[in-house]
Image: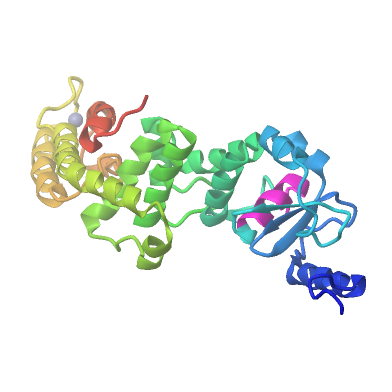
């Protein structure tokens, strides 16, 4: 009688083949002469240990561990299972291999891709990919007030990231700051987030909340933004009041400047009282007809000084630390 546990060799091979068939070769990140398969969500990425090790010590250590062979797409190539999504892993590998079409230095990419790369490059300690992704984010979330004012005034020409200014994306940037420990993102990100909180903009989309383990952190951040909004609103009002304070430049050469400033002050207080946009500078372009040049400069200088104070207060308003 034959032992049912001892299958004939041919049958075992067939089962082995079936296991292999379950894995799908990735269409893009699969290099025929690679020597290891990274398997994410049943998709095999055949890559080279040496290439990945060059970019990351973590990859080097991870891939140097002998692995079971039965998960691979070929019995002579070991496989490593990872818990990342196949899309995330594909982005990272293609970026490592040839600055792929999704992430060339001069190519505009969606924030979602950049966000993915930050997370996975941080996880696998691929510093060059992380640095490049972070530089794209920091161009829109700069660590100085004047750079932020410039970006808010005009989306930087030639910037290589498509960014939709939404509440969810502001939350994601704050999460990135926490993840990579770059607190320079916090002031601009909380400022941007606060604009959505004030506008009552769309909440974090529900699908994201369901699937994203970060949602609790998002809720906490949103609470801080809501709590900070009244402070920023008041500070914004003070910026406008101070800019249009009813006193003219010492060298003012126009009689009605004082009256114009007075009416502007009243107008600003009325119109701006619900806004938190302290770093949206008042457009002085059209003012040369009504105010003298010296007074225009004075208004801009006073606005800048008041904005500097708001910038310094942002961590207090939103209760975050920059250590
Ligand atoms: Zn004047």
- Image quadrant occupied by the C terminus: top left
In magenta stretch: residue 92: yes
Q: Position of residue 215 (x, y in %)?
A: 35, 54
- In the displayed structure, would residue 298 be above or below residue 280? above
| Residue 307 as seen in the image, left or right of residue 207 | left
Q: Quadrant of residue 12?
A: bottom right
Q: Which residues are magenta?
A: 88-100
Color style of the picture: rainbow
Q: Residue furthest top?
A: 250
Q: Main secondary structure of the magenta part?
A: helix
Q: Position of residue 8 (x, y in %)?
A: 89, 73
In magenta stretch: residue 280: no
Q: Position of residue 305 (x, y in %)?
A: 25, 26
**Residue shown at the point (39%, 45%) measured from the top left:** 153
Which quarter of the rendered image does ligand 1 occupy?
top left
| Residue 247 as seen in the image, left or right of residue 80 | left
| Residue 61 as seen in the image, left or right of residue 134 | right
- In the displayed structure, would residue 289 be above or below residue 84? above
Towards the viewer: 196 or 220: 220
Q: Quadrant of residue 289?
A: top left
Number of disc labels: 0
Q: Residue furthest front?
A: 1
Residue 30 seen from this side: yes
**Residue shown at the point (74%, 36%) measured from the top left:** 60
Towards the viewer: 210 or 174: 210
**Residue shown at the point (39%, 43%) measured from the top left:** 174
Towards the viewer: 19 or 218: 19
Q: Position of residue 270 (x, y in %)?
A: 9, 49
**Residue shown at the point (68%, 54%) measured from the top left:** 81
- In the displayed structure, would residue 69 be above or below residue 186? below
């Amino acid at each position: 009688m034959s032992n049912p546990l001892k299958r004939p060799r041919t049958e075992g091979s067939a089962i082995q083949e079936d296991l292999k068939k379950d894995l799908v070769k990735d269409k893009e990140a699969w290099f025929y002469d690679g020597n290891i398969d990274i398997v994410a969500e049943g998709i095999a990425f055949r890559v080279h240990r040496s290439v990945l090790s060059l970019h990351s010590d973590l990859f080097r250590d991870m891939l140097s561990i002998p692995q079971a062979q039965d998960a691979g797409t070929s019995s002579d190539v070991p496989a490593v299972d990872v818990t990342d999504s196949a899309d995330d892993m594909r982005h990272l590998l293609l970026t490592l291999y040839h600055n792929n079409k999704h992430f060339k230095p001069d190519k505009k990419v969606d924030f979602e891709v950049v966000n993915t790369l930050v997370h996975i490059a941080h996880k696998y300690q691929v510093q060059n990919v992380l640095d490049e992704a972070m530089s794209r984010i920091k161009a829109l979330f700069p660590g100085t007030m004047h750079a932020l004012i410039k970006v808010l005034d005009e989306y930087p020409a030639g910037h290589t990231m498509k960014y939709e200014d939404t509440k969810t994306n502001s939350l994601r940037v704050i999460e990135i700051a926490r993840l990579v420990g770059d607190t320079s993102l916090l002031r601009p990100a909380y400022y941007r987030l606060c604009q959505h909180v004030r506008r009552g903009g769309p909440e974090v989309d529900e699908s994201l909340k369901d699937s994203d383990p970060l949602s609790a952190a998002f809720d906490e951040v949103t609470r801080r933004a809501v709590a900070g909004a009244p402070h920023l609103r008041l500070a914004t009002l003070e910026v406008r009041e101070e800019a249009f304070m009813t006193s003219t430049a010492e060298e003012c050469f126009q009689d009605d400047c004082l009256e114009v400033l007075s009416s502007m002050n009243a107008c600003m207080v009325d119109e701006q009282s619900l806004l938190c946009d302290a770093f949206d500078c008042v457009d002085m372009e059209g003012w040369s007809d009504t105010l003298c040049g010296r007074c225009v400069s004075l208004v801009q200088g006073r606005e800048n000084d008041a904005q500097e104070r708001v910038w310094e207060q942002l961590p207090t308003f939103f209760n975050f630390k920059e250590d």
